[in-house]
Structure formats: C-alpha cells, structure tokens
Image (tube, rainbow, N blue to C red):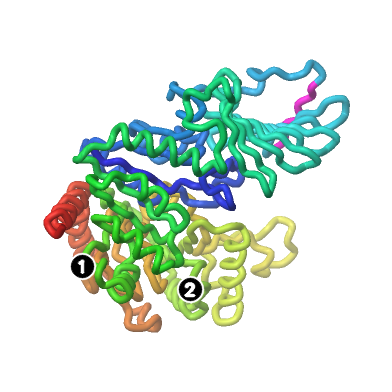
Amino acid sequence: MYYFIPSWSGSGDRIWHRDIIPWYRSMQRLEFDDSIHQIRIFQSENLPVQLLLPAYMPHARYLLHRQDIFETDYYSVFDEIQGIQSKEMQVLQIKDLDWEPDCEFVYTPFLVMVRRQGQLYAHVEFGVEGFISFIKFFKDDQLEKFYIFDDRGFVSSITYYEEGQPLYQDYLQPDGDWRIREHLKPDDGRVEVNPAYLLDFDKLEYECMPDLILEKLGHYIERNAGADSRFVLAAHPLYTQAILRLLPKNVQIILSFFHERNHTVDWSALEADLQQADLVLTDRMDFKKAIQRYLPRQAQKVHYLSPFDTRLQLGKSQRRRESKIFYQINLEEGLNDYAIFKVLHYVAKHPDTELTIGVYNAWQEGIQKVETKVQEVIDEYLNRYEFVKNYRRSEQAENALLENQEQDLRFTIKNITDELSLIQELDDTRLIIDLSEQPNLYTQIAGISAGIPQINLVGSEYVTHLQNGYILDSISDLPTAADYYLEGLKNWNQALIYSIEKIHHNTGLELIGRWEQWLKEAENAK
C-alpha cells in the first residue's frame, strides 16, 4: 500500500489550517502539485493508494473532485478529531439555515449581504462550486463570529471574536456540539478537549494544534502501517521532520520535492530529511545537482522525475489556417525585454501567425505588468498596425485613426489558472516558446502529450534539439528556430512522431516502474 501525505497547507502561522477562499479569489493559484499527479498516476494503473490528510480541510471533497481523484480512499485527521464518519456531500442553500424573521438578503455579484433593522448582520460567501463556504456575522459593524461550513452540509467550526480580534475557534461534530476549542490569542495557542469526549483523546489539553494533529496521525499510522507500506511524503520545509518521526522504521519512505513548495533550502535540515528517506524525487534537475554538490553522501537517493505523466491527446493545430504560438512567461524570473521583443517581432513579420502570451498563477498586478511591458515594446520598437488581424471603424469615431478602431489583434495575454486552461490553449497551438532559465515542467509534459514542438533556452529530459524542439544558443536565434517548425510541415511532423515516442517513455506505468526499480536499488543498498 502506498500512503500519500500531501502538503495541502495554509498560509501564515497556521499552516495546518488550509485557507478558506471565496470563489472570486480562488482562481489566482493553480492547485495541482506533485501529490495530486502522483495519485492520479497510481490510480490509472489500479494500484492501491490511500491519502492521509493532516490539515484542516472542510472542503476536501471538492478539491478531490476538481482534481479528478474523488474516488481516492482517504483518512482525515480532522474527521477523526471532529467525530465525522460520513463522506457523502450535501449542498446547503441559504434557505436551509435558520435566520431571524427580520433578516433582509441583498444579493451582490460576489456575496449575499444580510441586514437586520438597517444594520449589517452577515456576509454569506460561496466556494468555486457554488456551495456556502463561510458566513461572517457582525455586531455593531464588527466581526463577531465566523462560521466555516463543511462540504458535507454542516457547520464545521465557529471562530469567536472580541472587538474584531479572534478569541477561540470551536471545531464541531455534525450535530453542532464542539469537540475541541483552539485558543487564538497571540500568547495562547492551547487546544482544549470537550470533557464529554475525553475518551477519544490522549489528553484533555494540548499545548498547540500540531501536537494534537501529530497524535492522531501517529496513532493511525501505527494501526495501519505494515512491513510492505510505502509512505510518499510531500516535502515541506516546516514540518517534514515532524511527520518523518511518526513513520515506523520498517517502512519505505519516499520524499517528493516540488519546486513550488521548496524555493529555499536549509541544508542541515535537508540532510536530516534525506537520511531517513529511501528515495527522493525532484522535479528540478538543478535541485538534484545541488544535492550532488552539497550532500554527496545522499546523492544516490535523489532522482529527477516529473510528477506528471504524459497522455496522448494530440492537438488540432493543423485545422487552423494561422499558426498559433504559445509563449510562456515566468514572472518569478522577471520580464526579459529582449525575449519579449524577439517573440513579438517574429509575429509582427509573419501575418499568418497568432500569439498567446501565457502567465501562470498571476495576480492582476502581474497580468498588468505583462500588458504594460508588451505595450512598451510595441510602442518603442514595433508598429501596432502589424498586429491588427482585422478592424472596423467605431460608429462614434469621426476619423479612421487606429486608436478609434475596434481592433482584433493577433496576440492575447492569458492567465493560466488551472490545468484545463492550459490544455485548452494547447489544443490548437502550433509551437510552444519558453525562454525561462528553467522551462516549466508541466508545460513541457502537456506539450509532449499534444505533440507540439517547443523552443527553449535550456535542454531537458523532455525536449531534444531538432527532434521535438529547438534549444537556442542565444535568444537572437529565435526566428531561425521558429521558421524550422513553422515554414513547411516536414520538421513539424518529425517532432510529432518523436513526441509520441516520448509519450510512451513517460506514461504512468513507466513512471511507476522507475519508482519500483529505485526502491529496490535502495533496499539492496542497505
């Protein structure tokens, strides 16, 4: 049995408390990570897996459903803490809740505002799927209570406030009775257990919530782990060691390092983590090389492996008259003016091309930054007329100046907020350009799956020069690389054939085979 312990944590000091985000803010971050995709891979091969959820996640089932792993067997620490046995989802509507007779409901584009006797009484907020996510109750225009709803149709917890500051949070069982109370004052993080449920806990009081979480998770692992158990732990700099201490000595441990979670490295802490692991997976080749350099004794455990499997889903770019280019920008690396200019210049000089500039996980400020930079480059070095696909004169305009036209431009800027958005973009894409110092791994895998050649500055296991892509010596060579795949069909078709071969080498079954091989080698090395 493979047990997966993901890092689906929250922000701030309470990392074990997953952020409760209203629907209008939820699309700012991609949710997919290594754990999600690893579970998908194992499920696709009908291998037994179980998901262990240490974090407080009252909307866990919606997350699992969105990521197509809803059928995964899971154990939730907080389900045990709160005495929740059912996994059936139930949608609550506003009318299902008990409201005072004089409540007035005001429906806004974002939330439902409740007023009583002319005063603000509550804000009802909704999740992505439209269910009631949480309700804020107010008294004298100050926050008084904060109700978080479970996606199974009941109030999961209530946070109480005094003068706008949180006092404590009660975690409830489905019938509304509180089981534990977490104090929230800056100098008091105690967790009290309701004496009525003392038999379900080892202690009546805990110094902090992580102590209780680790107690429950440890007991579950002790009850269920056997000699053939394998634990896949999503490495997190703040709690990897704490969970490693819970795992028995006779099980195999796999650490998964995902770049989105591990930007910085504490080498002494990392060495301690690696010493306890049998296998270490990373999605960054530079991370593997760094370990080889700084921790050579642990380097044999570390393997570069994508957490994403390839799936044959070839695109339909050949059905378009225009050649669509997908140019990905990594905001973390900053904007490369010269790279942006070379891409835009190529599109300007080739009227049969269209450009989508894709940005991952960008806030509005990030999108605005890209838009401003693109506009600056066009205004300074290029001619905006060259990007107009077709335009018509505005009826109110008195002249035919370009600024008075409703323009249909040959480029667009899009924020990629989920996997589906990327897959849809690539469906009719002819060429992918990623000039980042570290090409985006998921885009590379999705590009291979769609059979699309890719232009990069850095070589990788997934893109081979003049086979399914073009590795540039310099950004100035971009036009040559683009022409190689867009001028005629021969090279593009060869890239398609090579991509199909790559797909077969990176299927779920192939990835699992590598896991098994590496674990066997680790066992033999002991």
Indicate the quadrant where residue 156 lies. Answer: top right
Give the numbered dot on residue 344. 2
Q: Nearer the viewer, mark 2 or mark 1?
A: 2
**Amino acid type for the residue under numbered disc 2:** Leu
Label 1 SS: helix
Question: In the rendered image, which residue does mark 1 sit on?
Answer: 490
The one nearer the camera, 30 or 218, is 218
Instruction: Inspect this view and state whether residue 314 appears.
Output: no
Give the numbered dot on residue 23. none
Residue at horizontal 38 percent and vertical 33 percent from the top: 75
Q: Magenta segment, principal secondary structure?
A: strand
**Amino acid type for the residue under numbered disc 1:** Lys
The one nearer the camera, 401 or 325, is 325
Mark 2 vs mark 1: which is more N-terminal?
A: 2
Compute the Cα span from label 2 to label 1: 25 Å
Asked whether disc 2 touches disc 1, contact meaning CB atoms under 8 Å apart, the reply is: no
Give the x, y percent position of residue 269.
Answer: 40, 63
Residue at horizontal 47 percent and vertical 35 percent from the top: 60
Q: Quadrant of the C terminus?
A: bottom left
Q: Residues within 10 Å of mark 1 (few under 14, many from 20)?
A: few
Magenta stretch in the rendered image = 103-108
Residue at horizontal 52 percent and vertical 73 percent from the top: 335
Instruction: Inspect this view and state whether residue 121 appears.
Output: yes
In the picture as drawn, the residue positioned furthest to the left comes out as 524
- Residue 222 part of the magenta segment: no
